Image (cartoon, rainbow, N blue to C red):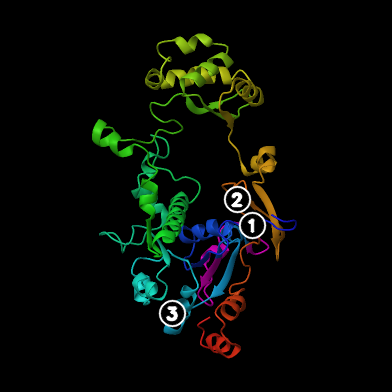
């Protein structure tokens, strides 16, 4: 590179139209935007994405939206009317990817099916995220992430055995679906270089959850075992749990590999435990999980958390505190890896948010601006500069409430 030049963001030149609302579709748009894709967020005029008001508020501003919609351009467009559908087709001519997470059949009802749009742009990739996918007997069911988490098997194994199934404290089903959709979009982009053709990326939220459920099915079909709620442990994997320290702090220790377990025993001052037949192998530790956890906690309760973690770190045993938001903000490792970044919000000023994941060594992603504060903020830029609509046409579309 010559002086003054900089590496382009890796997805620069990729244009994405985002039609979805809330989480599963838009989080995929966020990931693509983080790495330089031009993401055009479409909202119906007068009906903003509900995500704008989700989460805690500060001075009347929802604190989730600026993160979820960072790096995206906001336009308004009514897809329920024919003129709005024509405008979308003009956008599709200029796009590489279209993201939608409506109930299956909605795009077809609006005359915006993939068959219709691919006539306009044969290279279009259409990412369709829904509760149960575009096919199958459940395809028309409403499918929020919470339901998909339940039907994907996650809720059944989450929580403690003496209590009802619990949810994870974030919208994990939607997020997993967005991750899989993003992988699908990038895979389809790569394949398009070979074929010149686009395709549909069909992501079901329940399948995205089910896809990370490890050996759940062979456990059942081959071993007759149904995984259940086990609290903070994984059955047969030990030691891997939370342990109380002298200063009443819980820490996590993961030492289930043979070599790591031996180092844990040395840290505890009980090296002989590593050769005890009840604990010497992975299988044996799994069979005596409760007894082993009790022995470890007897040791951790003799020391404050800071001392326990210091000893374990010295011995190379994976361990750590259970962080709150406060702990994350104050942690020097988060700071060193730019995992809490700050950018300007038009109403709130300096705005903190999570950094970019993953980190690319040569062309890293970048947060260029927070989510558009005003709905339709980029109408002129997209409709006038990209689609070359003249002033008269724009005024007509506004008066007809198409944009």
Q: Nearer the viewer, residue 121 or 276?
A: 121
Closer to the chain start, of discs 2 and 3, is: 3
Element carrying mark 1: loop
Verify whether residue 9 appears in magenta. Answer: no
Identify the image quadrant of the N terminus.
bottom right
- Residue 52: x percent and y percent? 57, 64
Residue picked out by circle 2: 356
Quarter residue 290 falls in? top left
In space, the residues marked 2 and 3 are separated at their CA atoms by: 34 Å
Residue at image location 34% in from the left, 66% down from the top: 104
Residue at image location 49% in from the left, 19% down from the top: 259
Residue picked out by circle 3: 85
Task: Find out whether the residues at labels 1 and 2 contact each other: C-beta distance under 8 Å.
Answer: yes
Residue at image location 52% in from the left, 19% down from the top: 296
Query: For mark 2, does the 10 Å Cα neighbourhood hold few (<14), some (14 to 19), or many (20 or more) residues?
Result: some
Closer to the chain start, of discs 1 and 3, is: 3
Q: Give the range drawn in magenta.
A: 39-61
Is the residue 367 above or below the residue 235 in the image?
A: below
Q: In this view, does 120 lie to the left or right of 251?
A: left
Residue picked out by circle 1: 367
**Residue at far right of view:** 3
Quarter residue 61 falls in? bottom right
- Residue 357: x percent and y percent? 57, 48
In space, the residues marked 1 and 3 are separated at their CA atoms by: 31 Å
Element carrying mark 3: helix
**Residue at far front of view:** 2
Element carrying mark 2: loop
């Amino acid at each position: 590179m010559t002086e003054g030049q900089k590496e382009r963001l890796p997805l620069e030149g990729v244009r994405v139209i985002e039609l979805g609302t809330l989480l599963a579709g838009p989080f995929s748009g966020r990931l693509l935007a983080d790495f330089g894709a031009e993401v055009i967020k479409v909202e119906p005029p007068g009906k903003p994405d509900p995500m704008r008001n989700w989460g805690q508020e500060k001075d009347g501003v929802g604190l989730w939206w600026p993160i979820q919609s960072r790096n995206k351009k906001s336009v308004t467009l009514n897809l329920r009317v024919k003129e709005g559908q024509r405008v979308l087709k003009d956008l599709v001519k200029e796009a590489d990817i279209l993201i939608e997470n409506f109930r299956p059949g909605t795009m077809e009802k609006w005359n915006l099916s993939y068959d219709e749009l691919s006539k306009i742009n044969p290279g279009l990739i259409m990412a369709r995220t829904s509760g149960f996918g575009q096919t199958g007997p459940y395809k028309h069911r409403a499918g929020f992430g919470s339901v998909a988490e339940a039907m994907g098997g996650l809720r059944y194994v989450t929580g403690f055995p003496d209590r009802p199934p619990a949810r994870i404290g974030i919208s994990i089903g939607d997020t997993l679906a967005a991750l899989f959709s993003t992988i699908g979009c990038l895979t389809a982009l790569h394949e398009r270089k070979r074929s010149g053709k686009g395709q549909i990326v069909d992501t079901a939220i329940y399948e995205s959850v089910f896809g990370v459920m490890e050996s759940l099915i062979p456990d059942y079909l081959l071993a007759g075992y149904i995984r259940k709620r086990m609290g903070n442990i994984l059955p047969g994997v030990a030691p891997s749990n939370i342990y109380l320290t002298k200063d009443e702090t819980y820490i996590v220790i993961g030492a289930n590999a043979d070599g790591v377990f031996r180092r844990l025993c040395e840290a505890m001052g009980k090296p002989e435990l590593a050769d005890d037949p009840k604990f010497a192998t992975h299988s044996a530790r799994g069979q005596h999980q409760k007894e082993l956890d009790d022995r470890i906690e007897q040791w951790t309760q003799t020391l404050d958390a800071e001392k326990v973690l210091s000893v374990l770190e010295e011995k190379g045993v994976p361990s750590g505190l259970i962080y709150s938001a406060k702990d994350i903000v104050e942690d020097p490792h988060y700071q060193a890896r730019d995992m809490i970044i700050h950018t300007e919000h038009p109403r709130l000023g300096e705005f903190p948010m999570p950094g970019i994941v993953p980190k690319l060594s040569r062309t890293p992603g970048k947060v260029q601006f927070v989510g558009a504060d005003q709905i339709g903020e980029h109408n002129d830029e997209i409709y006038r500069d990209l689609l070359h609509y003249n002033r008269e046409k724009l005024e007509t579309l506004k008066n007809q409430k198409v944009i």
